[in-house]
Image (spheres, rainbow, N blue to C red):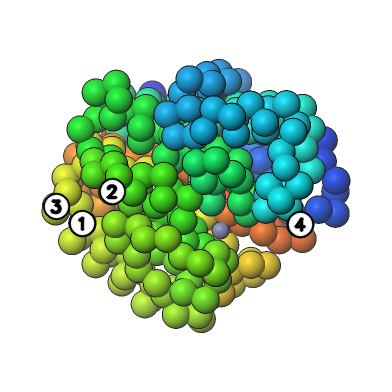
Amino acid sequence: MPLPLIYHDDYSPPFPAEHRFPMDKFRLLRDHLVDSGLVSDDALLRPQLCPTDTLALAHDRDYIARFMSGQLAREDQRRLGLPWSEALARRTVRAVGGSLLAAEQALQHGLACHLAGGTHHAHYDHPAGFCIFNDLAIISHHLLANGRVNRVLIFDCDVHQGDGTARILANTPDAITVSLHCEKNFPARKADSDWDIPLPMGMGDADYLQVVDDTLNYLLPLYQPDLVLYDAGVDVHKDDALGYLQLTDAGVSARDERVMRHCLGRDIPVMGVIGGGYSKDRHALARRHGLLHHSAHRVWTDLGL
Ligand SMILES: [Zn+2]
């Protein structure tokens, strides 16, 4: 069977073209993966909207209701940094549904990738840094509550710390939060993940990949999770507008491939979300996010999954 890839047309709603957040990148990523022959549009798996009860496993119900009805307080609106619309609310809940579907597919087939997801700055009762609901925390609570997994490990390689995920899951010992991030970067006030690995500015491919290898070689045998949620943020890239780690395309590709091989080599299913990525050149950005799906496809084919 083909590698499970999850996408929905809701992901890129109408949005101000010059906004700092590249809302069209999800559609451009889909176009790129189709144009490069990785997948046909009708083979992409379309998710349901995530039910409110599932969102509420990780979020305050009043916050969910305020956001869905467009009634965030001014301070929350400022922290979010995205203009509210019904289409934004719908894409937000659809994308959480997509991450859930990706996790289910990974548990069934070993590997699955989302064409969105990784909203790791979202907190229990407020948004932050373009993130509204925290898909990684929601999935973790959902799978643990349903007994689908006994332990889940979140391997967050976005260049920014996964502070929302760390705080929401702080008292959930069976959800292990791991964040590799540039030490000098948003958010200014860091949370405590189970494992924080702050990295120096300007770190290039070789040193970074060594840290990825060492971290997974230590943590995967230590915790033996039933599923790894991998945030493959490309804001580690040298051309990213918000990152400082100076990775090349080859470095990002190698990172993604190694993470998946580390997991699958130990018979641990892994699901990938795209995480952060920022650039005025939206086509270049879409190609950069697509490195994850191309890497996943190589791993999938090699392992004969
Ligand atoms: Zn980021």
Residue 285 on image: x %, y %: 66, 55
Which of pointers 3 and 2 lies earlier in the amino acid sequence?
A: 2
- Residue at 44% in and 80% down: 200
Say what amino acid the circle numbered 1 marks: Leu
Q: Which mark is residue 219?
A: 1
Are dots 1 and 3 in contact, CB under 8 Å? yes
4 or 2: mark nearer the eye: 2
Label 1, residues with CA under 10 Å away: few <14, some 14-19, many ≥20: some
User: Disc 1, ligand 1: is the CB inside 8 Å?
Assistant: no
Q: Nearer the viewer, residue 60 or 83?
A: 60
- Residue at 85% in and 46% down: 16
C-alpha span from label 1 to label 2? 10 Å
C-alpha span from label 1 to label 3? 6 Å
The residue that label 2 is drawn on is: 176
The residue that label 3 is drawn on is: 221
Answer above or below: position of 178 versus 82. Answer: below
Q: In which quarter of the image is the N terminus?
A: top left
C-alpha span from label 3 to label 2? 13 Å
